[in-house]
Image: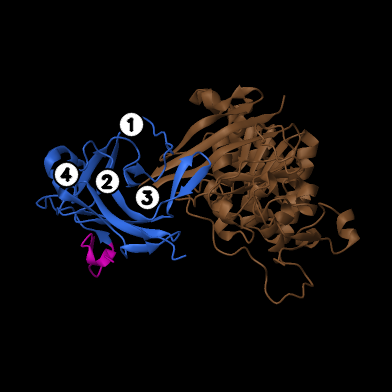
Amino acid sequence: MRRIYESGALRRDDDEPFSPREQEESVTPQAMRSIDSTSLSRLVVPNWIRHRAISIDVSTPRSTYPADAAIPFQVTMRNAMPFPITITTESPIVWSWEVDGITEASHVPLHDPPDERRGFRFDRGERKQFRKRWQQRFRVTDDEWESAEPGTHTIGAGLNVENAAEKGLYDETTVTIEPDAE
Amino acid sequence: MALLEVNDLTVKFYTQEGVVTAVDDLSYRIERGEKFGVVGESGAGKSVTALSLMRLIESPGRIESGEILFKGEDLLQMSEEEIRDVRGNEIAMIFQDAQTALNPVYTVGEQIAEAVRHHLDYGEEEARERTIQLLDTVGIPEAESRFSDYPHEFSGGMQQRAVIAMALSCDPDLLLCDEPTTALDVTIEAQILEELEGLADEFDTAIQLITHDLGVVAEVCDRVMVMYAGKPVEKAPVEDLYYDPKHPYTVGLMSSIPRVGNKRERLQTIPGTMPDLVELPPGCSFHPRCPYAEDACTKREPPLLDPETGTKVTGTDTERAAACLEYTGELQEGLDYSVEVRSESAKAEAGAGAGATAPNSERDRK
């Protein structure tokens, strides 16, 4: 911690140990030592760089699971740039996951987000990690679910931007559900 | 006409992790002068419900749908100016953490007097007198000299009382108490609850008491709503809830109340924790923790049902409802718990004491 006696703001002599020092005119003040790099990045970084800066990866610990076991998966997003990146998303839902192309494994829409855009901010070199679980169920109506069939299923996740896959803001992985041994 | 009627209220928070549905399709009503309890664990959506009533939900939160009718007018349709007239005046709130609720740079007296001046058009001197009187009512000693104290000069209990004084300052018709006594010790808690009850009776104020303490509910409330993961799971008059709980979660809450003289070695608890509201389990949200869960519970979400008839309950008029598949006949094994009232005197004192009056529910699966 910087102490007052290290700051040079006081003049100390035998008569007056605590008199304030005259301000030295020659010293230029250090104006704004940091800038709001998020806003700056939003202003100066073109969209295509922003999209290329962010990578997304979906992974599961195993590739096969027994029927009815929850399937954990991890979504990792990374900003490869040494400066902050803000991606503008279509709605306040900044990213979403899906199973076999069905958002959040639900045949009924779960959310009706307001029609407004949102900035999804990544610090320089930031890695965001989200852990989710798919319970091997598909929601078929508001209050009913059914089990997923054994076989191969695709778990994907992408940022909520137009054509996320084309822009490299979508990734997917496949898992196999083994049928019951009985 | 009910004083407050909440219909299908849904509140969501848009976070990086996903969409948190803090309150999901909630309906209830509160009559004039009624004391209504909302119970549930942390994260059940109790506080968000209360904040929605005051329209104090901030970004990234959003009231997605529903209506909040207060004296027949929808609070969600009001302009910011109109809602400011209601806030603190007709609906007041006692916040959970008094130290945070009070502004540290204004004196306690000034903070209370401000509401009085604003809503009741009192002059400087009149507002001061009314504030001193209020501080005295809530039991602050030497109220006149404490008027110009700052919040840090008050003890925790006194801060809570100051917040209560602030809430009562404009004689509201509805008082939202968000765990008003959680931060206090039991003697102060008893005093404050007594004061609240007395004041409510005196001014015919309705109280919505949010708490996770079932003892407090038994002492104060007329009707109770139990919430779990943003949804109501049981609604009942307070005596029915204690002597005849219909939802396994309520039974779990009851059996986890510590009791003096209990011979059991360990306190019974509900295993696990409240699910992540971003990612609710499929089917009944409570099934991963429910000792009676069956396969059907993982595939169907039960609506609120009349436990007697098994018919779906909609709207706010029902006295008794529980959200469990038991009442649709879909559970094969059924709910296998029994409620044992240890002493008859406990029944006679229904609603008169904390943990001790709660029935002993044996929920071990036989």
Instruction: Identify the residue under disc 2.
Output: A158
Q: Is B266 on the left-hand or right-hand side of A46?
A: right
- Tell me what hue chain B is rendered in: brown
Distance from Cα at disc 2 to Cα at disc 4: 12 Å
Q: Position of residue B151 (x, y in %)?
A: 56, 51
Callout 1: few (<14), some (14-19), or many (20+) C-alpha neighbours within 10 Å? Answer: few
Residue placed at 37% from the left, 50% from the top? Answer: B17
Looking at the rendered structure, the kind of residue marked 4 is His
Q: Position of residue B276 (x, y in %)?
A: 47, 54
Q: Is residue B87 above or below residue A53?
A: above
Image quadrant containing the C terminus of chain B:
bottom right
Instruction: Identify the residue under disc 3.
Output: B17
Does the magenta stretch mainly form a helix, a strand or a loop? Answer: loop
Callout 4: few (<14), some (14-19), or many (20+) C-alpha neighbours within 10 Å? Answer: some
Distance from Cα at disc 2 to Cα at disc 1: 18 Å
Which numbered disc, 2 or 3, marks the residue closer to the eye? Answer: 2
> Is residue A4 found inside the magenta-colored segment of the image?
yes
Instruction: Identify the residue under disc 4.
Output: A51
Tag 2 secondary structure: strand
